[in-house]
Amino acid sequence: MQKLPSQNEGWREALKFINKCPVCSASYLPEQAILFGKNESASLVHLTCATCQSYFVAMILVLGQGFSSVGMVTDLNLTDAKRLHTAAPFTVDEAIAGFELIKDKKLFTSLLLSGK
């Protein structure tokens, strides 16, 4: 009888299904996967393609006898992903202020050009 992976290492088993870069189709190597977030049922994994240098972030859930995962291509390197994962979420007021800023095209353009 095959031994099931432990909850701590189950995310590594799921990497068999996340085996190709979605940008260039090159194969990922298992050691390219770096765990940067975890709770009791989900693991956040960052991968960098050795061929095209694109980044991929996956959330892997270990569910009883199986796995579920969702992932996305991103522009976040591992350092950015770790930093943003632990950052405080935006408040509703911050989201509204951001929307108002973008809506004011002159102010938005001037801020973009000033580098602030």
Image: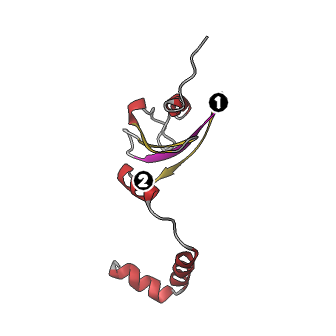
Question: On the rendered structure, is 21 left or right of 113?
Answer: right
Q: Which segment is the magenta one?
A: 54-64
Q: Looking at the picture, which amino acid does disc 1 mark?
A: Gly
- Dot 1 falls on a residue whose secondary structure is strand
Question: On the rendered structure, is 114 left or right of 76?
Answer: left
Q: Looking at the picture, which amino acid does disc 2 mark?
A: Ala
Between discs 2 and 1, the one toward the N terminus: 1
Question: Circle 1 sits on which residue?
Answer: 66
Residue at 42% across / 53% down in the picture?
81
Q: Nearer the viewer, residue 7 or 85?
A: 7
Residue 41 magenta-highlighted:
no
Question: On the rendered structure, is 7 left or right of 65?
Answer: left
- Dot 2 falls on a residue whose secondary structure is helix
Residue at 38% across / 49% down in the picture?
78
Residue 98: % across, % down: 52, 78
Residue 60: % across, % down: 56, 40
Residue 60 magenta-highlighted:
yes
Question: Circle 2 sits on which residue?
Answer: 81
Chosen colour scheme = secondary structure
